[in-house]
Amino acid sequence: MKIAVMGCGTVGSGVVDIIDNKSDLMIRSANENIEVKYILDIRDFSDSPLASRIVKDIDVILNDDEIETVVETMGGVEPAFTFCKKCLEKGKNVVTSNKALVAAKAEELFDAARNNNAAFMFEAAVCGGIPVIRTLFSALSANNILSFAGILNGTTNFILTKMINEKMSFDTALKIAQDKGYAEKDPTADVEGLDAGRKTCILASIAYGHHVYPEEIHTEGIKAITLEDAAYAASKGYKIKLLGKADKRNDGKIGAIVCPFFVNETSMISGVNGVYNAISVKGDSVGDVLLYGQGAGKEATASAVVGDVMECARLKKNEKHYYWDKHEDGIIEDYMLYETALYIRGYAKNAKNSIINIREAFGGVSVLSREDAPENEIAFITSKATEKELRETLSELKDFAPASIIRIL
Ligand code: HSE
């Protein structure tokens, strides 16, 4: 399948990298060779290895019948909307990472897709590499979604984490997030909560079956949050997190809000740091489901885009089955060859002497202690080696009988 990529910035270039370098995986998993034929970008790429594929005119893509799927990673509503709509009207599938586009224009793009028997996919538009869109549309589709709440913006979570854990200033943390390619072109969309707002609307639209527009939901960002607030939060066992949340109210309406929350330090979501995102979804049949992963960044977001492209290839082939190749002898690695450290607890005739022997045999261990341990009990953690080597060393120890061995992850 030949494709075109519109917009060769952080995410678009990541998409080209993956498709150019993982053709084996495309064939194995989608049963189709996928090739980037054109890259649409108005910037100068004359010195780049991509130069031969760069085009400046959308009509080149629209008028080439070989192009079956178009990736849109330009960002912003226009001209992305016009380009995507034209591609769909030509019967080309569209895959986008553009949450502004989906939040504002999905209704019209769905119509264009349906009327022209094309696919419109946007897994990368919410939470970068986390497969939340397909999970809601497909895996959890037997559920009424009672509520969801999540850290939906990597840049603000990165900034809050740096401010709270490292006492870094807001501006320094934002600069790092921009350098790492997490932030939007205009980072106001991140820090004022607009990006999280768009993602909340997309998720709410899927969950509740009606388009929810960003203008309709209350949105606050993190600009007013200070280290003083973080300190007061910590004094009561909370962390501050920017969340997007929604639920179905008793009167049938959709409740949705984006703002900083005090989150209990014992909750799973409070441990989600840096560029990571997490979404907790409550379905009426499944109960609680938690999704976690990198919410921004070139590779993580491109991974979601390419996953959609591969899904388009599977649709084309009308692939209805999950499959894998037959078993191959010798394909499983012997676990004894894995590198690991081991926790070992056991009993010795003379604990003091045994500890000297253990240290010598393993070349240094960390000896553990606990209250009320019997005198002949020894527990320690080895340094890393293959399990085979560690077990051989252990079996050569005299006067020590192991009772418990647990691998350190
Ligand atoms: N600026 C966005 C974020 C990029 O930081 O989450 C991914 O949507």
Image (tube, rainbow, N blue to C red):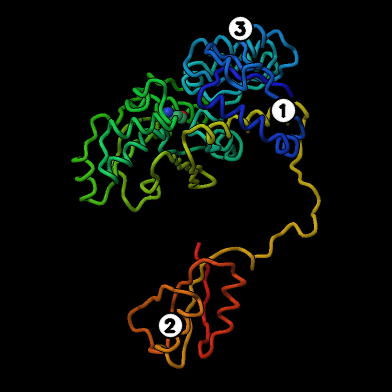
Q: Which quarter of the picture shows residue 312?
A: top right
Please report contact status of discs 2 and 3: CB closer than 8 Å, yes or no: no
How crowded pointer 1 is (Cα within 10 Å; few <14, some 14-19, many 20+) is rated as many
In front: 295, or 365? 365
Q: Amino acid at mark 3?
A: Asp
Percent position of residue 32, x then y: 76, 31
How crowded pointer 2 is (Cα within 10 Å; few <14, some 14-19, many 20+) is rated as many
**Ligand 1 neighbours mark 3 (CB distance < 8 Å):** no
Q: Is residue 266 left or right of residue 384?
A: left
The circle on residue 57 is: 3
How crowded pointer 3 is (Cα within 10 Å; few <14, some 14-19, many 20+) is rated as few
**Ligand 1 neighbours mark 2 (CB distance < 8 Å):** no
Distance, label 1 to label 3, CA atoms, is 22 Å
The residue depicted at 80 percent of the width and 55 percent of the height is 328
Looking at the picture, does residue 165 appear above or below residue 54? below
Residue at the farthest front position:
47
- Label 1 SS: loop
Q: Which quarter of the picture shows residue 315?
A: top right
> Which residue in the protein does label 2 denote?
378
Q: Amino acid at mark 2?
A: Ile
Q: Which quarter of the picture shows residue 212?
A: top left
Percent position of residue 262, x then y: 28, 42
The residue depicted at 38 percent of the width and 32 percent of the height is 177
Percent position of residue 304, x then y: 57, 33
Which label's residue is closer to the chain start, 2 or 3?
3
The residue depicted at 38 percent of the width and 18 percent of the height is 215
In front: 132, or 334? 334
Looking at the picture, does residue 286 appear above or below residue 34? below
